[in-house]
Every structure is written in C-alpha cells, then in structure tokens.
Amino acid sequence: MQAQQNPVEHVARLIRAVPDFPKKGIMYRDITPMLADPGALALAVELMANPFRGHKFDVVVGAESRGFIFGVAVAQALGCGFVPVRKPGKLPSKAVSVSYTLEYGQDSLEMHADAFPAGTKVLVVDDLLATGGTLKACCELVERVGGVVAGATALIELADLGGRALIAPRDVHTVIRF
C-alpha cells in the first residue's frame, strides 16, 4: 500500500524550477505545471485560504497577473469579493499608484481609488513572496484608500530573499518555502 503524499509536497512537486529566467542569476518558480493539474490547483487554493477561514474579510486583493489566478479563487473560497491591482494604465477610473522594487527590477501597480470603502478588511493574495515588493505595494495601495490589511497569503515564499520582513508586522501565510 502506497503512503499518501503530504498535500504541500504534492503541490510543490508540480512547481518547476527554471534557472536564469527572466535573467541570469534568477531561479524562476514556474507554477504553470501545477495550474494544469486540477487537483493540485484546488489543493493550492485551499492551502492558501484555510489559515484565514473564520476571519471576516470583505475583499481579497490580488496583483496582476498571477495574483488574479489565486486571488479570485481564494475570494470565492472565503466568500468575499475580489479587487484587482493592475499594472499602470489598465484601470478605467481614477486610480492610486505605488512604485516598488522587484527581485529583478522596478515596477508600479495601481488600484481604483474607490475600490472599497474606508475600513474594509482586506486579505492580500499573490502567487509568490520573494523580496516582498509586490505584496508590500499591494498593502500600501489598500491602506492608501483606507482599507485595513488583515492578512496576506502567497503560494510560494523564496525565504532567502527576506520579503517577509518587508511585509511585517502584517500577518503573512505562505504554503511552500524554497
């Protein structure tokens, strides 16, 4: 009889390491094989959402583009709405913007200025926590429009890059640590 695989290990096994992408020295964690497996995808969403069950969130915020994949699914799992955070110039109404540092460069993100009322409890969701730049930028956008960051969750954490410290003291949950 075969031993049952740990759920986290099952998801992690389907994440492909791609050296030197998008530039030399970066070890890219490709989630597309995991996304193609319906059981692993469902399991990943549950593992991201479960620590926050029983907490009352009004909305989930997720950053373009892989944060959309997990953000909508986690929002559905937790019974709340979803607010997208986009790259500049993609939103049709008045937006707030923040610039931040990535593992391999600089970028900016935007969110509608009227995305939700002040005091809204928000869970920030992304696929990856590396240097913390994207998650921190999302948290800053939420707070800039009056929301309260009540937690953050990511599927993968690249622990050696120290991104968790940049998000502190916010409650951050990650499923897989490399």
Image (spheres, rainbow, N blue to C red):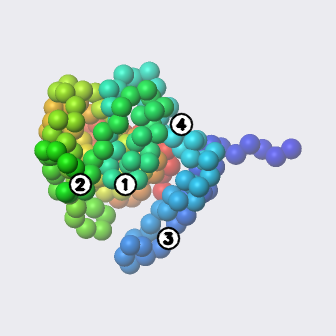
Give the spatial CA distance, label 2 vs label 4: 29 Å
For the residue marked with disc 4, what is the amino acid?
A: Glu
Residue 14 lies in quadrant:
bottom right
Residue bearing the label numbered 4: 46
Dot 2: within a 10 Å radius of its alpha carbon, few (fewer than 14), some, or many (20 or more) residues? few
**Spot occupied by residue 85 in the image (x, y as percentages of width and height):** 27, 47
Dot 4: within a 10 Å radius of its alpha carbon, few (fewer than 14), some, or many (20 or more) residues? some
Please tell me the numbered disc located at residue 90: 2
**Spot occupied by residue 152 in the image (x, y as percentages of width and height):** 35, 39
Mark 1 / mark 3, whichever is N-terminal: 3
What element does badge 1 sit on? loop
- Seen in the image, is 12 located left or right of residue 92? right
Residue bearing the label numbered 1: 65
For the residue marked with disc 1, what is the amino acid?
A: Ser
Mark 2 / mark 4, whichever is N-terminal: 4
Q: Do the residues under discs 3 and 4 have CB atoms within 8 angstroms? A: no
Residue at the (62%, 52%) spot, across then down: 37
For the residue marked with disc 3, what is the amino acid?
A: Val
Mark 2 / mark 1, whichever is N-terminal: 1
Mark 4 / mark 1, whichever is N-terminal: 4
Q: Residue reaching furthest right?
A: 1
Please tell me the numbered disc located at residue 18: 3
Mark 2 / mark 3, whichever is N-terminal: 3
Give the spatial CA distance, label 3 vs label 4: 26 Å
